[in-house]
């Protein structure tokens, strides 16, 4: 039975005749099963058809029986440890010196047989949770069990929490089943652990048992259940839980409200998420963050930034998550102006030294070529984690500063920071982009030898590109065949790029066919294969590709480029004449073409493996990136660099033209295409003409 939405105003109406909890009546006065428990279904809650019913309660392994009578019948000598050791453990935990506390606990373990107080065990449990130490959990629980410590409900809950927080869910379930007494805290702990571990089927199964036992879950339980429905990605389950929260009077709870916003966003209904947000009696920081994240999740980047400004103007306190999220949105928008404002707000609100927000700032500046700004922020950070280092190293590498990337990596190792697989991806990419072959191979070999990191497909793709850049196509092909796993699309794409640059049609055709087979729904693969067939004179095969495209009704979208001028983005398509300044743009571009022709520019009509529509050959002189460049030159001061973003890989003709345009105008032009960043300056490009 569904509960009416009462006076709550929403754009949707609950009309789902089929309850997502079939066979169960959500009665708030008397709860009962209409059908047997094993007939309960919650939409897609079954995981691969396997059901795992909860075990029947068993006697606890820790003796909690009549302890006093047992002691009278079999008196034992109890050793009482020095109160100094116990108090020292408790003090260390109080000061969050968890590792030292567990080291001190070893003294008691070595002697054995000491009877510890509840407060000492409580402190040791906190230490295990603080360190997320599975070994510590086993040590403390084993000592507790072997010394016959009597657990009351509070300590049983603490032991359960210790297992849950350390991810030991199998042991946590067993402990939960064996508990002779449970309260709401107990149920919330196990449900929360199951939600965090992603076992949503068990979450709902346990929730039904809890409901049957007439335990009112309250706001915390429903917030976790709504999170579980978000994990399932099924909006109907979440809506029924929403109605339950309304009936029970917990819908206005901040945790429930934020969970609902998150659930509706993840389930694809940003309108419902906005409606929940609008109905919040008090819009908190978490509420604002949730709705901003919801818009960003669905690609509504401009709306997300607009919400950020609303949040700022409302006077609500912003946290590091707010700023890191907005900076990532600015990265997607390629908006330097918005990012600068977010940076200023970050400092103004006291997060100038926050590791999360500043790492996002380093990432933004790095991704858009502002390496001096990125390095300045990085150097000012009092603490850095591996993500901070990765962002800076990747930034140097992506913009063709391979030596600087390697220098930062070596400095990272000197400072005893442990690299991860992302670090090596950044380093190998830097070596690949900058043509540092020997260094690249040395780092590739050191991954498993020195750092015990297994090379993944992404690392192999970097090495294939490194070989391809040196023209070693046979060696690159051999590396693909020798990989200890099935080659991925990125690996074949790296080989295909090398074949395009070095005019190797034979291997290029093989790579293109592999890509076509692996990603049959990816439109660009059809055009890649079509152009390579045309270039190699295999017209019959090319015609077959065209027929496949027509049969599937697939068509390449027009190439698009955009540039931001005075905080306003301007979009261009090839041959576009819809802009208000069309006449001035085309005149500027014609003048530029005339001038660069004096420096050797000849329109390139060679299309080996382009990622653009074949029809664009007719408008080669007016490709979208050229129009965006001309517009930027007209509307920006002469000392500022141009930053252009485009949806496709830049063609060879535009690449050659923009190199010379940068030279004759004395401007730096940065183009972020579907492949990488291109920094054009003085008739050269940071990619080394390899992309």
Image (cartoon, rainbow, N blue to C red):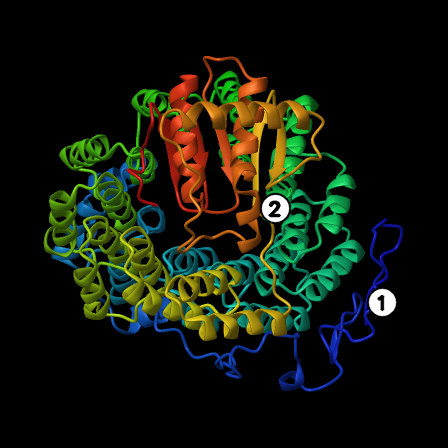
Sequence-first tag of 1 and 2: 1
Seen as rendered, the residue at the extreme right is 7
* Marks 1 & 2, CB-CB < 8 Å contact: no
The mark lying in front, picked from 1 and 2, is 2
Residue 614 spot, x, y in % from top left: 53, 55
| Quarter occupied by residue 449 | bottom left
Identify the residue position indicated by label 2 in the image: 299
The image shows residue 183, relative to residue 259, as above or below, that is below
Q: Nearer the viewer, residue 368 or 249?
A: 368
Image quadrant occupied by the N terminus: bottom right
The image shows residue 103, relative to residue 381, as above or below, that is below
Query: What residue appears at the point 52 percent right and 81 percent down from the top-left corner?
Result: 53
Q: Nearer the viewer, residue 67 or 212?
A: 212
Residue 384 spot, x, y in % from top left: 30, 32
Query: What residue appears at the point 74 percent right and 56 percent down from the top-left corner?
Result: 245
Identify the residue position indicated by label 1 in the image: 15
Label 1: how many Cα within 10 Å (few below 14, some 14–19, many 20+)? few
Q: CA distance from mark 1 to mark 2?
A: 29 Å
């Amino acid at each position: 039975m569904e509960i009416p939405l009462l006076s709550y105003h929403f754009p949707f109406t609950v009309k789902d005749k089929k309850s997502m909890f079939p066979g169960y009546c959500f009665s708030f006065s008397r709860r009962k099963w209409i059908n047997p428990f094993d007939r309960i279904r919650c939409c897609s809650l079954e995981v691969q058809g396997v059901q795992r019913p909860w075990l029947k309660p068993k006697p606890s392994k820790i003796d909690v029986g009549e302890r006093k009578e047992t002691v009278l019948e079999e008196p034992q000598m109890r050793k009482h440890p020095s109160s100094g050791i116990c108090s020292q453990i408790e003090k260390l935990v109080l000061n969050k010196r968890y590792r030292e506390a567990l080291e001190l606990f070893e003294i008691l373990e070595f002697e054995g047989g000491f009877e510890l107080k509840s407060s000492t065990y409580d402190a040791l449990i906190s230490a295990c949770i603080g360190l997320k130490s599975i070994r510590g959990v086993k040590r403390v629980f084993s000592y507790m069990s072997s010394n016959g410590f009597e657990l009351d409900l509070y300590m049983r809950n603490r032991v359960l929490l210790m297992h849950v927080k350390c991810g030991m869910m199998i042991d946590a379930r067993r402990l939960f089943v064996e508990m002779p007494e449970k309260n709401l805290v107990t149920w919330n702990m196990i449900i929360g652990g199951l939600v965090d571990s992603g076992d949503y089927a068990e979450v709902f199964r346990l929730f039904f048992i809890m409901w049957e036992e007439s335990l009112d879950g309250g706001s915390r339980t429903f917030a976790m259940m709504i999170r579980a429905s978000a994990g399932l990605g099924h909006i109907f389950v979440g809506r029924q839980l929403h109605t339950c929260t309304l009936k029970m009077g917990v819908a206005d709870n901040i945790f429930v409200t934020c969970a609902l916003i998150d659930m509706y966003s993840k389930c694809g209904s940003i309108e419902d998420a906005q409606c929940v947000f609008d109905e919040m009696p008090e819009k908190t920081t978490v509420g604002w963050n949730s709705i901003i994240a919801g818009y960003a999740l669905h690609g509504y980047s401009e709306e997300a930034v607009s919400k950020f400004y609303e949040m700022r103007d409302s006077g609500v306190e912003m946290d590091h998550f707010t700023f890191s999220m907005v900076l990532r949105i600015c990265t997607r928008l390629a908006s330097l102006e918005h990012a600068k404002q977010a940076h200023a707000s970050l400092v103004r609100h006291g997060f100038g030294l926050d590791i999360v927000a500043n790492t996002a700032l380093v990432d933004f500046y790095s991704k858009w070529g502002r390496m001096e700004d990125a390095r300045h922020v990085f150097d000012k950070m009092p603490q850095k984690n591996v993500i901070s280092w990765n962002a800076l190293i990747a930034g140097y590498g992506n913009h063709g500063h391979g030596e600087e990337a390697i220098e930062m990596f070596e400095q990272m190792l000197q400072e005893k920071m442990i690299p991860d697989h992302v670090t090596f991806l950044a380093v190998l990419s830097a070596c690949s982009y900058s043509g540092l072959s020997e260094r690249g191979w040395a780092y590739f070999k050191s991954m498993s030898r020195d750092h015990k990191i297994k090379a993944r497909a992404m690392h192999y793709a970097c090495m294939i590109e490194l070989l391809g850049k040196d023209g070693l196509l046979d060696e690159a092909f051999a590396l693909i065949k020798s990989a200890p796993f099935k080659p991925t699309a990125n690996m074949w794409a790296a080989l295909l790029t090398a074949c395009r640059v070095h005019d190797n049609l034979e291997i290029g055709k093989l790579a293109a066919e592999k890509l076509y087979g692996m990603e049959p729904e990816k439109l660009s693969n059809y055009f890649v294969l079509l152009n390579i067939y045309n270039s190699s004179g295999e017209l019959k095969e090319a015609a077959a590709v065209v027929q496949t495209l027509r049969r599937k009704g697939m068509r390449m979208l027009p190439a698009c480029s955009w540039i931001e001028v005075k905080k306003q983005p301007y979009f261009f398509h090839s041959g576009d004449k819809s802009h208000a300044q069309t006449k001035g743009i085309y005149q500027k571009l014609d003048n530029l073409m005339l001038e660069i022709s004096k420096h050797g520019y000849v329109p390139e009509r060679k299309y080996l493996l382009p990622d653009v529509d074949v029809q664009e050959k007719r408008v080669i002189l007016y490709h979208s990136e050229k129009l965006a460049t001309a517009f930027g030159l007209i509307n920006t001061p002469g000392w500022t660099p141009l930053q252009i973003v485009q949806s496709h890989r830049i063609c060879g003709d535009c690449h050659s033209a923009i190199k010379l345009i940068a030279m004759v105008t004395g401007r730096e032009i940065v183009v972020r295409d579907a492949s990488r960043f291109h920094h054009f300056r003085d008739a050269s490009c940071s990619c080394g003409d390899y992309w």
